[in-house]
Image: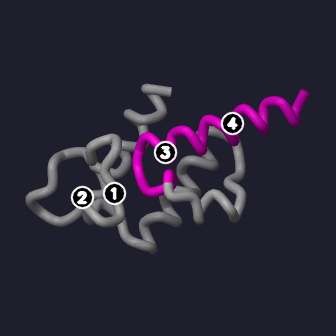
Amino acid sequence: MENLQDYIAKWLGDMGGPKGLPERPALDDDYFQAGYIDSMGIMDLVLELEGEFGFTFRESDFQLREFSTVIGLAAIVDRRMKESAHASL
């Protein structure tokens, strides 16, 4: 899961939010409020994660409080990847 957190934090950092932000968001910071990504950028992130890791988010995932932190998002992605792997057996 740590590699997944790193992947997400790096992706968000590479988005190049407002100047003055650390290179990557802290794992437990709200990356929306910190300014790393906006509502348009989140769609890019969703598509990136779904394509890279071979799963599909549920609509309800976007309403979860954990969706807005790197740790929480990584946990959601991990759950969806496990579900996808289990469903394909």
Q: Is residue 24 left or right of residue 7?
A: left
Residue 47 pos. (x, y %): 58, 57
Q: Earlier in the sequence, mark 2 or mark 4?
A: 2
* Residue assigned mark 1: 31
Q: Give the secondary structure at mark 4.
A: helix
* Residue assigned mark 2: 16
Is disc 1 surrounded by few (<14), some (14 to 19) or many (20+) residues within 10 Å?
many
Q: Earlier in the sequence, mark 3 or mark 2?
A: 2
**Image vertical order of residue 43 relative to residue 27, above or below:** below
The answer to if 74 sits in the magenta stretch is yes
Q: Give the secondary structure at mark 1.
A: helix
Is disc 3 surrounded by few (<14), some (14 to 19) or many (20+) residues within 10 Å?
some
**Label disc, if present, on residue 81 of the rendered structure:** 4
Mark 3 vs mark 2: in front: 3
Q: Earlier in the sequence, mark 1 or mark 3?
A: 1
Q: Residue at x 69, y 64 (%)?
A: 59
* Residue assigned mark 3: 72
Q: Earlier in the sequence, mark 1 or mark 2?
A: 2
- What's under tag 1, amino acid-wise? Tyr
The answer to if 85 sits in the magenta stretch is yes
Q: Quadrant of residue 26?
A: top left
Residue 54 pos. (x, y %): 69, 41
Q: CA distance from mark 1 to mark 4?
A: 22 Å
- What's under tag 3, amino acid-wise? Gly
Is disc 4 surrounded by few (<14), some (14 to 19) or many (20+) residues within 10 Å?
some
Contact between labelled residues 2 and 3, with CB atoms less than 8 Å apart: no
